Image (tube, helix red, strand yellow):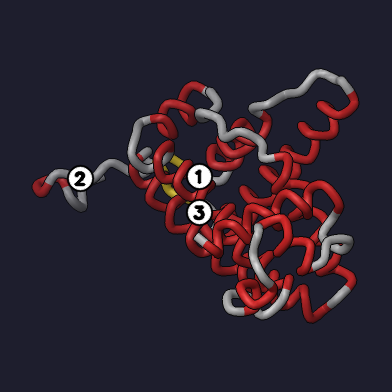
Amino acid sequence: MTVSALLDAAMELFAERGYGATSIPEICARAGLTKGAFYSNFADKDALFLTLLDRSWQRRAEWLGRVMPTSGALALALENREALPGLATDREWTLVSTEFSLRAIRQPSVAALLVEHERRVRSELAVLVAAAMQRAGRLPTVPVAVIARMIVAVTEGSDIQALTDNAAGAPVQADLGQQAIVALLRSLSRPAEPTAAPGQRGRL
């Protein structure tokens, strides 16, 4: 409960004011908790952010696991060029994660923390993608780890575009990220060879 309250408060403040402009005492005040409660759960603000990263990934992983491996949605999408069921763009998370990424670019020590977390996230995503492609009867033509990295890149980029268009009052293409995933999986995979019957193996 304490951790959730701190995470929720931090997310709100990071989105409202920015990561750099938000202090730990402000997070504690928003959560209605003491600094002692904060430091009993997180070493610093960066550690709290990385926990937010994990929480965001879990939500996306649940969506991927629900949509891709357990249904025919991916096979249908690849065959008929349809988009996958959508995942709503998270404005708060996009604002916070983009700012933190910029901070990581400027500070190598922060970058090292972020890269380590993202490496694990992409590994978990690669497992989901491999399972999804297997169920859809597809074989990857490049390493699945590469596909996972591309999926992260295009979905994050599409979220930024959608939010920017929305802020400008321009038309928003909400399913751009899902269409990009389908396009990537289609172009970087091929249909699996049908398994030969026992008596047919070795025949041309």
Q: Identify residue for label 3.
A: 58
Q: Amino acid at mark 2?
A: Ala
Marks 1/2: CA–CA distance = 21 Å
Is residue 80 placed above or below 2 in the rendered structure? above
Question: In this figure, which residue is indicated by the disc labeled 2?
Answer: 196
Count of numbered tags? 3
Q: Quadrant of residue 168?
A: top right
> Residue 37 falls in which quadrant of the image?
bottom right
* Horizontal arrangement in the rendering, residue 63 relative to residue 194 (left or right): right
Secondary structure found at label 3? helix
Q: Measured from the top left, where is residue 188 in percent x and y?
A: 56, 46
Q: Amino acid at mark 3?
A: Gln
Q: Is residue 17 above or below residue 39?
A: above
What kind of residue is marked 1?
Ser
Q: Residue furthest left?
A: 199
Q: Which residue is mark 1?
A: 189
First in sequence: mark 1 vs mark 3: 3
Percent position (x, y) of residue 197? 14, 44
Residue 90 point in image, percent of width and height? 67, 40
Q: Nearer the viewer, mark 1 or mark 3?
A: 3
Using the numbered discs, state the Cα–Cα distance from disc 1 to disc 3 in whole angstroms.
26 Å
